[in-house]
Amino acid sequence: MNTFTKRFQFSLLLLLAAGLLIAPALKAQFHAVGGFESNLPSYWTKGGEPAGSTLTWATDQARTLARSLKITKGVTSAEAAWVSENAVDYWSPQHVANVDIKIGAWVKTQNVNTNPANDDARWWISYTFWDQAGQLIGETKLPIDQSVATSNGFVADTNGVGETVLPRDAWTTIIKFVGGKNATGTVWADDFIHVGRAGAWAGQNWNQTVDVPTGWLYWFPPIGGNDGRILNGYENTRLTNEEAHSGLTSLRFELPFNRQPHDAFVGSKRFPLNQFPGGVKAGEVLRISVWVKAKNLVPDSAKAYPVTWAVGFTYGFFKGNGNNDGFNNVSGYPIDTQFSFPSVTQFNWTKYSLDVKVPNDPEARTFEVRLHPYSRFTGTVYFDDLSVEKLDLPNLAAVGGFESACLLIGKKAASLRVRH
């Protein structure tokens, strides 16, 4: 390519960015990865809500973060139950055999029936395990304390040492939080624990604090959150109605200036690329977009540390999204990117977008996006309306390819620094 051609292409790109040249029509197939309006927590379903009972994804009580699972009931015709989907997933493709696994949850009771005479009158939590062939391995059932009607806050309800040691790997784990048909009162459950004792790796369950909605997952320090602990400022993470770009709810990270450095993320669950009509082919372009609002920023620090004092997208292509597929990333992915915020302490809702090319790898079948605060970032940042679009692009060979690391969308300029 000669120097004149390069300058001509660059000039056209500048004109397009400035809105001074009419671009060819650009069509998109839209996939809304999500806002945060779902009324169900990720990985959980209402397994039974008979008349006389109410199941709530509650905001009135929580041990960690801001939400819990709640059951309120009188005498009913059947059990009332929150039931998980398969808690085996992502980089924990099995729950591991021959490890002493500590499991359970933190529970709070209010006006429950006491001293139950049989299972119908009991409240409990259970973990049930199945192997690769779908054969039952076993169940650990944890009765919730009903010696008193009302507990003193949240109380750990866990198994004993050596009580849960799987003889073979579990490929499916289902967690239940249940009120028997004659059990009465109100119980909240939070921080569903799954961790190997003595530091052993036992696999992981997901959305342990039940705080992210359908379609999302997270990893928070120190070890993901599945031991009931979240640190380094991420304990302030919330679904909040303080701010929203659309609907009523957004995701808020509130990371104090004096926090110990560590990164974390809230991300989409992997979704198949073939959900777009015709699928997605190598070389086609996906546009990732999210709306961001921020305050309490420290622009001098962000300028000094543009990679670590930042938030951004981490995106990746994967070979599948089955619960037992593991972290089957396509080589070279995930990739971290950083938003380049304006040099201000706060700004209003702004759309940040990034175009990424689908790799030439036949195993690139699924995609994920993480909303990723990096290790040194401090401030308050809200996210809403994450989307992924497949762009139907005209032949733009005359104005360049799609190797640029940033794309400006919307009325306000929003850019991305990209680290490969």
Image (tube, rainbow, N blue to C red):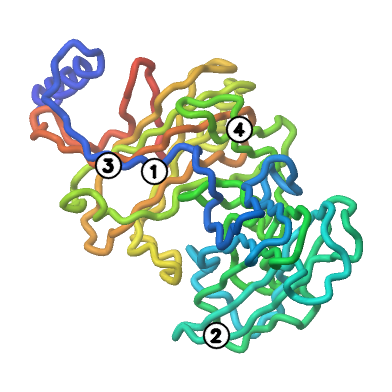
Q: Which residue is mark 2?
A: 136
Circles 4 and 3 in contact, beta carbons < 8 Å: no
- Residue name at image x 79 percent, y 66 percent: 144
Kind of residue at badge 3: Leu
**104 and 89: which one is in front?**
104
* Residue 276: % across, % down: 23, 49
**2 and 181: which one is in front?**
181
Left or right, 200 with respect to 252, comes to right
Q: Quadrant of residue 167?
A: bottom right
Q: How many marks?
A: 4
Instruction: Say whether disc 2 or disc 3 marks the residue closer to the N-terminus.
Output: 2
Which label was assigned to residue 286? 3
Q: Secondary structure at mark 4?
A: strand
Badge 3 density bin: few <14, some 14–19, many ≥20, Cα 10 Å: many
Badge 1 density bin: few <14, some 14–19, many ≥20, Cα 10 Å: many
Kind of residue at badge 1: Val
Q: Which residue is mark 1?
A: 33
- Residue name at image x 68 percent, y 74 percent: 200
Circles 4 and 2 in contact, beta carbons < 8 Å: no
* Residue 5: % across, % down: 9, 25
* Residue 52: % across, % down: 66, 54
Instruction: Say whether disc 4 or disc 2 marks the residue closer to the N-terminus.
Output: 2
Badge 2 density bin: few <14, some 14–19, many ≥20, Cα 10 Å: few
Q: CA distance from mark 4 to mark 2?
A: 40 Å
Q: Quadrant of the N terminus?
A: top left
Q: Nearer the viewer, mark 4 or mark 3?
A: 4
- Residue name at image x 66 percent, y 52 percent: 69
Q: CA distance from mark 4 to mark 3?
A: 29 Å
Q: Is residue 411 above or below residue 47?
A: above
Instruction: Say whether disc 4 or disc 3 marks the residue closer to the N-terminus.
Output: 4
Q: Which residue is mark 4?
A: 240
